[in-house]
Image: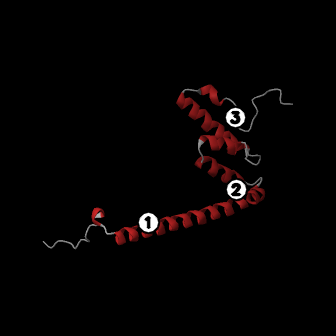
Amino acid sequence: MVQKHRHPVIDWNRMTDRQRQMKARAENLTAQIALDQHRENDRANKALFASVESVLAQLAGTPKAVEFFRMFSEAATLANAKRIANHPDCPDVVRDEIAQRIEKAGATRGHEGAASVAPGKSGNASGD
């Protein structure tokens, strides 16, 4: 049976100074590419975030607003879902879903009373 051609393995212990310099340049270039890609991703995220408020204003009171908040709350951690429920534009149906999720998580941990107040609602009865 014919053996496949394999590339020789680099012996890192036997590299010359020139080879070490070449390796360092390659590592620096790779790090720079990663940093550039990270910066570009950050710029794209900031552009999206800058548009969120106007999108929310356009969606206010529509079924799409429910889906928008539902998608974000389902993808969010429990702590972030609570914050989403406290957003002034969050529809009540989504707030209720988040409250159920909190109750379920509390019951799973055995802390059923920990989530007795629904997000977006005050636990203080004298709030007038």
Query: For the residues carrying marks 2 and 3, which lies nearer the camera in this image?
Result: 3
Coordinates of residue 43 in the picture (x, y in percent)? 64, 64
How many tags in the picture? 3
C-alpha distance separating marks 2 and 3? 23 Å
**From this viewpoint, is residue 71 visible?**
yes
Q: Which mark is residue 40?
A: none
Coordinates of residue 106 in the picture (x, y in percent)? 58, 31
| Above-or-below relation of 41 to 117 | below
Residue named by callout 1:
27
Which is more toward the observer, 65 or 102?
102
Is residue 121 left or right of 23 when viewed as pictured?
right
Cβ–Cβ under 8 Å for marks 3 and 1: no
User: Which secondary structure, mark 2?
Assistant: helix
The residue under the point 70% across, 56% down is: 64
Q: Earlier in the sequence, mark 1 or mark 2?
A: 1
Residue named by callout 3:
118
C-alpha distance separating marks 1 and 2? 46 Å
Q: Which mark is residue 64?
A: 2
Colour setting: secondary structure
Type of residue at label 3? Answer: Ala
Query: For the residues carrying marks 3 and 1, which lies nearer the camera in this image?
Result: 1
The residue under the point 31% across, 67% down is: 15
